[in-house]
Image: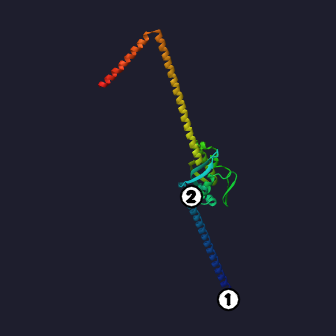
Amino acid sequence: MAANKGQEAMKKALQNAKGAGAGLGLLAAAGVAAYGLSQAMFTGILFIRILFLFVLLISMDLHVNNPIQIRSPTGSKDLQMVNIGLRVLSRPNPEQLVKIYRTLGQNWEERVLPSICNEVCVNNIFQFNTSITLIFNLQVLKGVVAKFNASQLITQRQQVSMLVRKALIERAMDFNIILDDVSLTELAFSPQYSAAVEAKQVAAQEAQRASFLVERAKQQRQEKIVQAEGEAASAKLLGEAMKSDPGFLKLRKIRAAQKIARTVSEANNNKKR
């Protein structure tokens, strides 16, 4: 009786041990499966991130070959309206691609470049959207142009272009944007100012022409005075010579006759030929 009870207890213990082993095996298998799944998910997420950055880099890098044209009316130092045109060749900072995409979006050029090329009110706030607010404490394009008057913008265009380029490159760095090239393509004034400049040039040309005519008249008058003085001096000397030497007049007559004879002889020779 006791022996039978012992055997039954051994059987139950063996069954319990087998059940526990099976449970541990299942638990180990579940752990391995969970670990493999987590690694697969991590690898997949990492792959997606790398692929996303690669596509973002390619899509943003395409902008390098597509410069944008920016036009803006502004005022000169002497309050003349000037239409400024710029050609800007830009690209994002490769080290800040994710930040640029998150804050500015894929159309970062359209949001940033026209705004930094145009003066908003100094020390005023300008909002692109609810997530990005910019304080323009610097006058970029209009700030540079306002340092020159209208005539200086024409005569010192190269210096204006250099100042605009420098200011825009420094301002674009605040947004992690690199400007490879900034060119001043247009510098046009209002029709009224252009007409005034043309009229001024015409008036200046007329004034120069009048000054030339006056100067030429003065020279001609001086030439006549000198010629008259020379003739008067010559007549005076001739009169004095005739008074002092009566033979002088005969000598002049002989020379005049010789000159006339020479002229007649040359004329006859030309007719015979």
Is the residue marked by circle 2 packed among few (<14), some (14-19), or many (20+) residues within 10 Å? many
From the top left corner, tell me how far across and down residue 10 is, in percent.
Answer: 67, 84
User: Which residue is denoted by mark 1 in the rendering?
Assistant: 4
Q: Do the residues labelled 1 and 2 touch (CB within 8 Å)?
A: no
97 or 22, nearer to the observer: 97
Splitting the image into 4 quarters, where does residue 93 fall? bottom right
205 or 32, nearer to the observer: 205
From the top left corner, tell me how far across and down residue 224 is, in percent.
Answer: 51, 24
60 or 240, nearer to the observer: 240
Q: Is mark 1 on a helix, strand or loop?
A: helix
Residue 161, visible in the rendered structure: no
Splitting the image into 4 quarters, where does residue 2 fall? bottom right
Q: Quadrant of the N terminus?
A: bottom right
Total labels: the figure holds 2
Q: Which amino acid does label 2 sit on?
A: Met
3 or 98, nearer to the observer: 98
User: Which residue is denoted by mark 2 in the rendering?
Assistant: 60
